[in-house]
Image: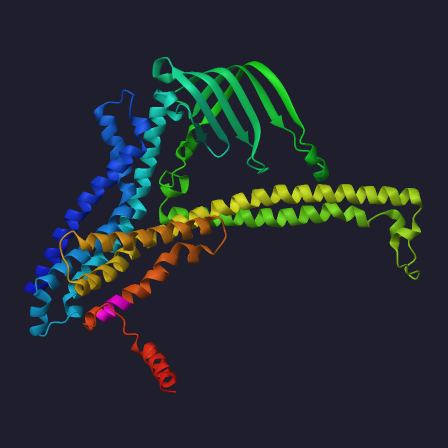
Amino acid sequence: MKILDRYIIKSFTITFTSVFVILFFIFVLQGIWLFISELAGKDLDFFTIIKFLSFYAPTIVPLVLPLSVVLASIMTFGSFAENYEFAAMKSSGISLQRAMRMLTLFIIGLSIISFVFANNVIPKAQYKFLNLRKTIVQQRPAMAIAEGQFNPIGPAINIKVEKKSGDNGRYLENVTMHIKNVNAGLGANTVIKAKNGILRSDENSNSLQLELLDGNYYENIIPKKYEERNKQPFAKSSFKKYILNIDLTKLDENNGDNSDITSEKMLTLSELNYTIDSLQTNLNKDIVSFAENALQRNDYVFQLNRVQNIDKENKVDDLLSIFTNKEKQKILEMANSNTSSTEFSIQNSETDLEYKKKNLNSHWVVVHEKFIIAFSCILMFFIGAPLGAIIRKGGIGLPIVFAIIIFISFHFMNTFGKKLAEENTIPIVLGMWISSIILTPLAIFLTYRATNDIGIMINFDWLIDPIKKLFSRFSKN
């Protein structure tokens, strides 16, 4: 390795390490703020808090790493250009492309390391993080519920508590719960209100027991016939004691934050491939099974004995004309009932299939995320390095502005595409790679202009000159 390559790599490494440590510390503080409700007032020892943050820290690397690469690239190459070091290189016959060669290999190595880290370290950290949170909840049950707001516990339960008291806040006052039927997909089907409640837990159990006292139970009744749903019937009952078990494995959905843990994020690439294959097979079987059941359910309509005995030579335009009025009425009632039943079955099955499809999509999202982390390092470098050479500004002023704009654009497009992909609105590949697809031409454009020493301004004379000539002709006339 030549002296120049060592100097460039050393300058970039020092800047990158400093930026990464600072940003990592900032994001960890943001994590503390995010989970402050789980840490404050729980009598946790210092070692447990350190473990909590240590297991959370690897999950923020996918955010910190691209931002650190683009900022370090802009600062390093901007400093080279500002101090006329690039001018000295060019006078010696060394182009920007040649100066970036060894650093490009360094960034490729960093991207490989980031992929290995995302595939092996982050899933284990996610698993330990979730289990530590579950342990804290089991020891201090009230941690799962905050006062004065609705707390989502799993995909189906929302609970609100006005006040907590007693040891670790286990005694609750004025409890309101909304429980929805996930399969039906019709919102909150059950509402429970109670004057008091008690939280209990067992360290050897994965469930949290909630005992409600002196309350009422309201449940929406969904009629089988679709046309009767507008009546909105419901059942009401009162109780002295009602016991509800809450699954602690769904604790990852407590905060409703995207950075929380989900089961698919705990899997490596090989485990994800196996799980995706199983989920896809089950989904295909469910689709075929639903189609076959729907066909068999409607077959009997076309198998009436009276219709089977029709003389094939006697053709009729109106099939109902061969029946009596009484039989016509029965047939129409049967058809109406069968249509309503089929429509209701389709709606329920559609919700179930959509849920399974979204679950499959979430696994595919995690697969693509592992590769996006690696590619983002290369992409951010080829945006930041030429941009720094073009703007010719080092330090922490202007480079930070450009780095934040680029990173926010990348993160916003990545999050937006991810949401659309999970909802099955657009293909998974397009949704997960939309940010890279949009920003890659920018990286190519900046690299081309920087290596050819053109600058960032684009010449629009080819568009403006014909317009000027056209106006000059009109002015002469």
Picture coordinates of residue 210 (x, y %)?
A: 47, 19
Residue at the outermost bottom position: 477
Location of residue 1 (image quadrant) = bottom left
* Residue drawn at point x = 70 percent, y = 44 percent: 342
Location of residue 78 (image quadrant) = bottom left
Q: Main secondary structure of the magenta part?
A: helix
For residue 306, above or below residue 1: above
Nearer to the camera, 268 or 446: 446
For residue 263, above or below residue 210: below
Horizontal side of residue 189 vs 99, given as left or right: right
Horizontal side of residue 67 vs 471, given as left or right: left
Residue range (magenta): 445-449
- Which quarter of the rendering shows the C terminus? bottom left
Location of residue 389 (image quadrant) = bottom left
Horizontal side of residue 236 vs 319, given as left or right: left
Horizontal side of residue 452 vs 336, given as left or right: left
* Residue drawn at point x = 36 percent, y = 57 percent: 435
For residue 344, above or below residue 95: above
Nearer to the camera, 232 or 133: 232
Q: Is residue 446 magenta?
A: yes
Q: Is residue 273 visible?
A: no
Q: Is residue 135 visible?
A: yes
Q: Is residue 280 magenta?
A: no
